[in-house]
Image (cartoon, rainbow, N blue to C red):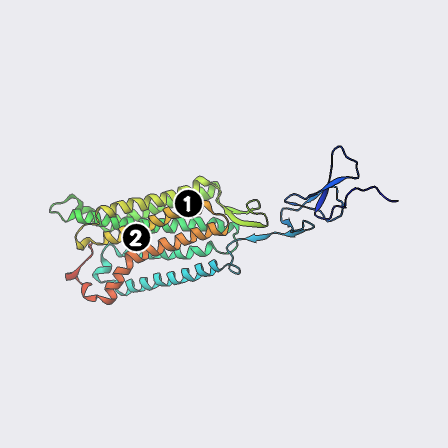
Amino acid sequence: MPKSRCNDRCPPGKRKTQKEGIYVCCYDCTPCSEREMSNVTDSERCFRCPDEEWPDDGKVRCVPRTYDFLSYENDVLSLVFSLSTLICSSLVIFTLAIFIYYWHTPIVTANNRTVSFILLTSILLSFLCVFLFLGRPVDITCMLRQVSFGMSFSISVSCVLAKTVTVCIAFKATKPGSYWRKWVTVKLSNSLVFTCSFVQVMICSIWLSVSPPYQEYDMFSYSVIIIIQCNEGSVIGFYSVLGYMGFLAAVSFLLAFMVRTLPDSFNEAKYITFSMLVFCSVWIAMSPAYLSTRGKYMVAVEVFSILTSSAGILGCIFFPKCYIMLFKPELNSRGKRIYCRK
């Protein structure tokens, strides 16, 4: 039988909307809302797509949403970060080999060889922890990435702080009958590194035991993209790790800045000042960028900060020493000592 109609049928992707005060055969065709679809003509209502899917452009069927993370296969950033990490790690290993080869020379024995060795090792671990940030996040990598980054950086900054304190005390101990002479020992530097690092270990242990990081799917920030990311669990634990690391860096920078004008025999304070200046500048500049981005770009900002700050410590503290050992060996003698000695 013929049916009364005063307008065309509603195509798929739209639904019928009745007009008030007009005959039933007259209606409007309203497009389906953002997360809904309709695949029949003259549909009375639209159907919501599952969380893992999204309507296509015509809103006639649901299509799978794409997953977003810092992938090895699809992102050039992952390749760049991987190559940068391997290059920087190779430089650390090369520097470590130089220090081992010149182990008994004055420039290596200055400022505690053990602390220098620990510092190089922690810088290497800082570079290698970048690989935990790349690829698809899972629960175990989410737990390890921030903890390994925080602990390796805290050890690095603790070593720099120990070197800074050594420079300060060594300068005070040069005065005749100085009280500080008894503090110019290897035990002081080692104890300082252990104590400062142990505090960070305790913070990380409490964080992991109370509310550890875990993998989560962010389905609401973007329409057709599902962000696979790490939820930090306890926000207090996360910012406590970063805050303590920043506190160590700030103390080390202030101490090194105060003694930066010492004579040349104490000029490692200048290199420490530059390294901490780079470190603090990178992380201060990183904070607003980190908080204003999401998904893989937020991870990329943190990875870039890790690589830059680690490279800053390596370059400012160790490259001048390597330059002297390799190209200015005449300065690496007791008569031409340019670094304070234990």
Above or below — where is 45 with respect to 155? Answer: above
Relative to 320, say whether 38 is above or below: above
Say which residue appears at 24% left-offset and 64% top-offset: 325
Residue in the picture at 26% in, 60% down: 320
Q: Which residue is mark 2?
A: 275
* For discs 2 and 1, the disc positioned in front in the rendered view: 1
Residue at image x 75%, y 44%?
A: 43
Seen at 27% across and 49% down, the residue is: 162
Q: Is 137 above or below relative to 325?
A: above
Specify the amino acid type for callout 2: Ser
Q: Earlier in the sequence, mark 2 or mark 1?
A: 2
Residue nearest the viewer, comparing 216 with 76: 76
Q: SS for tag 2?
A: helix
Residue 180: x percent and y percent?
18, 45
Looking at the image, which residue sits at the far front? 6
Q: Residue furthest right?
A: 1
Residue 182, horizontal then vertical, whole percent: 18, 46
Left or right, 185 with respect to 48, comes to: left
Quadrant of res 123? bottom left
| Residue 175 visible in the current orientation | yes
179 relative to 117 in the view: left or right? left
User: At which x and y percent is residue 314?
Assistant: 32, 57
- Marks 2 and 1 sit apart, C-alpha to C-alpha, by 22 Å
Q: Report if residue 119 is visible in the image.
A: no
Q: Is 289 situated left or right of 111 in this image?
A: right
Q: Quadrant of the N terminus?
A: top right
Residue 203 percent coordinates (x, y): 40, 42
Q: Is residue 119 above or below residue 98?
A: above
Residue marked by disc 1: 288
Q: Residues within 10 Å of mark 1 (few under 14, many from 20)?
A: few
